[in-house]
Amino acid sequence: MSAGGGTRAIIAALAANLGIAATKFIAWLLTGSSSMLAESIHSVADSGNQGLLLLGGKRSQRKATPEHPFGYGRDRYIYAFIVSIVLFSVGGLFALYEAYHKIQHPEPIESWQWVPVVVLVVAIGLETYSFRTAIHESNLVRGEIGWVRFVRRAKAPELPVVLLEDLGALIGLVFALFGVVLTLITHNGLWDGVGTAAIGLLLVSIAVVLAIETKSLLLGEGATPEDVRKIEQAFLGGEGVERIIHMKTLYLGPEELLVAAKVAVPRSARAEEIATHINEAEERIRAALPIARVIYIEPDIYSPSAGSPPAAGAQTVDTAPPAHA
């Protein structure tokens, strides 16, 4: 995923949420609606989250240092994980607390009754714009895969985070509108609390999904099966590499992949020839998969009888040699 696409989606969401948060707070002050307060905190949390994503993207661009020789690409994962925690605690748990308080002591909306409805309708329009921007930017990189698979497999966290946040915001606004309208119709503040509880449960659910996905990225994910096949073909697409004994890949950041492999070379090859063939293999790999920026290749002699056991988690074992004319 291009960082530019993710940044555009974040900025669109940030602009929408800042405006929405201000209007929601005004509506809450005028009406005392708990749904409006929950939605106000939700928008503030979302604005803070987008700020965190922008900060993570900025910090990830720092150059490698002796202390961090592989750079800071994973900062984007760290800040995305913090976003899930903020969404869970500030957004979800606060809304559930406010819902409990409102259900225990329901109060009708007595003054400025039209304000929350107007604010929520306007907010739905702004969030729809933000959501459409995130969808447009995601479609540029999503390809043919489905949305669930895109969220689960995306290595750059910004677009999935913004997509889920905007989706949650839209559904949350519908819940808030439901609670406010029923409160106005029935003059029973219980419905306001019910809408607030629905918002809290929704935010907690989205936060859990985000936490699970970003935790996987933090632990370290390897290349997709499609990219692994590209690397294999690049390895075996030239001379000097008889087979891949085993191979591992690891994302150092959303746009930087590490490739480490042990490959079999001819027994009769000289050191100079082996070095040349390894360099050529690296060039082929980078041409096939430009994000493979860090490549370590260990030459070895393949012995079917003795075998060279692959390390735990190896992605490719005993790949057959290419056919030569």
Image: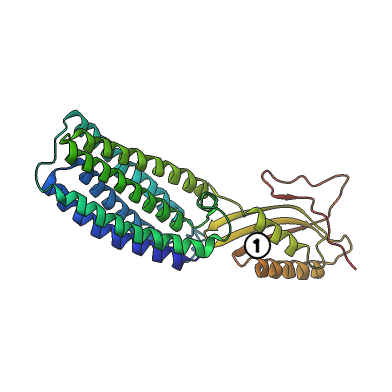
Instruction: Please state if 129 lies on the left or on the right of 110 as rendered.
Output: right
Instruction: Please state if 27 lies on the left or on the right of 306 as rendered.
Output: left
Estimate how packed mark 1 is, as few (under 14), some (14 to 19) or many (20 or more) residues with alpha carbons within 10 Å.
some
Residue 200 percent coordinates (x, y): 31, 39
Residue type pointed to by label 1: Ile
Q: Residue at x 9, y 45 (%)?
A: 111
Q: Residue most toward the front? A: 185
Q: Is mark 1 on a helix, strand or loop?
A: strand
Instruction: Please state if 70 lies on the left or on the right of 173 as rendered.
Output: right
Q: Residue at x 21, y 31 (%)?
A: 103
Name the colour scheme: rainbow
Residue 3 percent coordinates (x, y): 46, 65
User: Which residue position is annotated with label 1?
Assistant: 295
User: Which one is nearer the viewer's eye here, 140 or 52?
Assistant: 140
User: Which one is nearer the viewer's eye here, 120 or 74?
Assistant: 120
User: Which one is nearer the viewer's eye here, 243 or 232?
Assistant: 232
Relative vertical location of residue 131 with respect to residue 315 in this rendering, above or below: below
User: Which one is nearer the viewer's eye here, 231 or 161?
Assistant: 161
Q: Residue most toward the top? A: 104
Tell me the quadrant of the picture where the C terminus can be found: bottom right
Residue 5 visible at all: yes
Relative vertical location of residue 218 with respect to residue 141 in this rendering, above or below: above
Residue 254 percent coordinates (x, y): 52, 59
Q: Report the label total.
A: 1
Relative vertical location of residue 318 with respect to residue 271 in this rendering, above or below: above
Residue 55 visible at all: no
Q: Residue at x 53, y 53 (%)?
A: 150
